[in-house]
Image (spheres, rainbow, N blue to C red):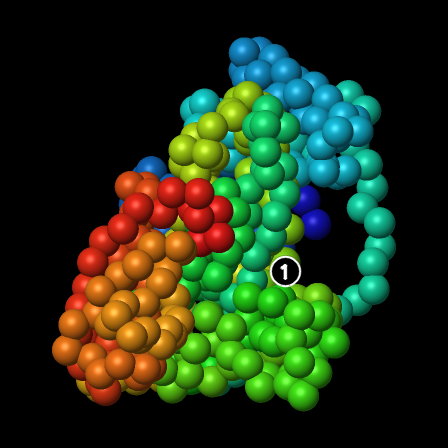
Amino acid sequence: MEQIHRRLTDEQIRLIFRNYCDRQLTREEVQEILGVGKSQFFVLLKTYRLDPSGFSVSYQRHTPGKLAVEAEQVIQQELKREKELVEDPELPISSYNYSALRDRLKRKGIEVSLPTIIKRAKEQECYRPRRKGKIHDREVVTTAIGALIQHDASTHLWSPFAKEKWTLITSIDDYSRKLLYADFVTQETSWAHIQAAQAVLQTNGLPLSYYVDNLRVFRFVQKRDSVWRKHVLQTDDIDPQWRQVMRLLRVNVTYALSPQAKGKVERPYRWLQDRIVRTCALEKLNSLDDVRSVLRDELDRYNNHQVHSTTGEIPSLRFENARKNGNSFFRPFSLPKPYTSPKDVFCLHGSRIVNGYRRISLFNQDIEVPHVPLREDVELHLVPDLPNNALEVRIWFQHKMVHSLTMPLGDHLSIF
């Protein structure tokens, strides 16, 4: 039915309501004349009674009917840049991202809806229909935050103007879908993953379980890792450095059997990769610090502003609400005895035998170990300081730290 303001004038409608208030017309008769339902009738009646003389149903547009010429030009320019990215065979971008384009326009002060952008894209042949994929019913399996932390890493050329690939390490809470950690490293190592775990655990507490793949950093697998080992060792008979940290803190670790099994963390990777690579290409960024800045912006958008498609909630809000309501498996962070410093937990572990001169050898350097009997095993806790190319060595014997020193990493920097 045609809208009221197109069929009747304000004066005619005021007269109808005046007659209703004077009991000359019934409600049913007014509804039939106006062509409205019961609910809309009472809304209009309430508005009329508030201001009978000023009552009006004339439609007033709250937004401009047409975009300004300048805005149209900017949209056209951004669509052209988007097309260049999609058609560049050197970039891992194969589809248009109109949401990202809308966000760029918003930063330039241009508010425009997604359907309008898509309409302009079709008009300028900057459009590719999405391929229909297999329907995947995603759901949240866990019932509380801290029940499962999915942890992974992804190595890519994150900026087409960079000279090397970097690795993005992330940790995501399964229940809230909040990214608890995300940062770039120049090289994926055990130490990089230990530092990521330290940031998550000291900030949020100790979760019930971590979920990782079968990368060497996380798991020893016989036949794959045992070329240089005796074949009497079976899978999981040896704990890699990262796994030793989890065992010390009594955090369970489960392993994914395939990349598809880590879908909850793989999807944010695809989202971040598309956004970050796209921004780096458009802004011609080539330094790690600049790309980290882009990552921080996208992390803030994902955690604090974007409604997650599976949970229907903003990840940070869902996380905080669960914590406030006591719906959490996180335990307060505490150091296992006898340790009093995080350095003795979040470190690389090793061992040596004290020789007849009461010394041990590390990286071809002799280190004196006082107050330890000859031929006894000592435990080494190695804490790299990569920015300063230094290594702190903490030596433990019978649950006590007997010596500590700092030595240069030198040529051994790459192994950390």
| Near-viewer residue (55 or 108) | 108
Q: Residue at x 68, y 44 (%)?
A: 2
Residue type at mark 1 is: Glu
Residue placed under numbered mark 1 in the picture: 266
* Residue 297 x, y percent position in the rendering: 42, 41
* Residue 374 x, y percent position in the rendering: 26, 81
| Near-viewer residue (149 or 370) | 370
- Residue 209 in view, yes or no: yes
* Residue 228 x, y percent position in the rendering: 66, 70
Q: Residue at x 58, y 16 (%)?
A: 74
Q: Quadrant of residue 67?
A: top right
Question: In the displayed image of the protein, which residue is found farthest to the front?
Answer: 356
* Residue 169 x, y percent position in the rendering: 50, 55
The number of numbered discs placed on residues in the rendered structure image is 1
Left or right, 278 with reference to 334? right
Q: Residue at x 21, y 70 (%)?
A: 369
| Near-viewer residue (196 or 230) | 230
Label 1, residues with CA under 10 Å away: few <14, some 14-19, many ≥20: some
In the rendered image, the vertical position of residue 348 relative to residue 87, given as above or below:
below
Q: Quadrant of residue 245?
A: bottom left
Left or right, 364 with reference to 50? right
Q: Secondary structure at mark 1?
A: helix
In the rendered image, the vertical position of residue 121 relative to residue 300, given as above or below:
above
Left or right, 59 with reference to 259? left
- Residue 256 in view, yes or no: no
Q: Residue at x 23, y 53 (%)?
A: 406
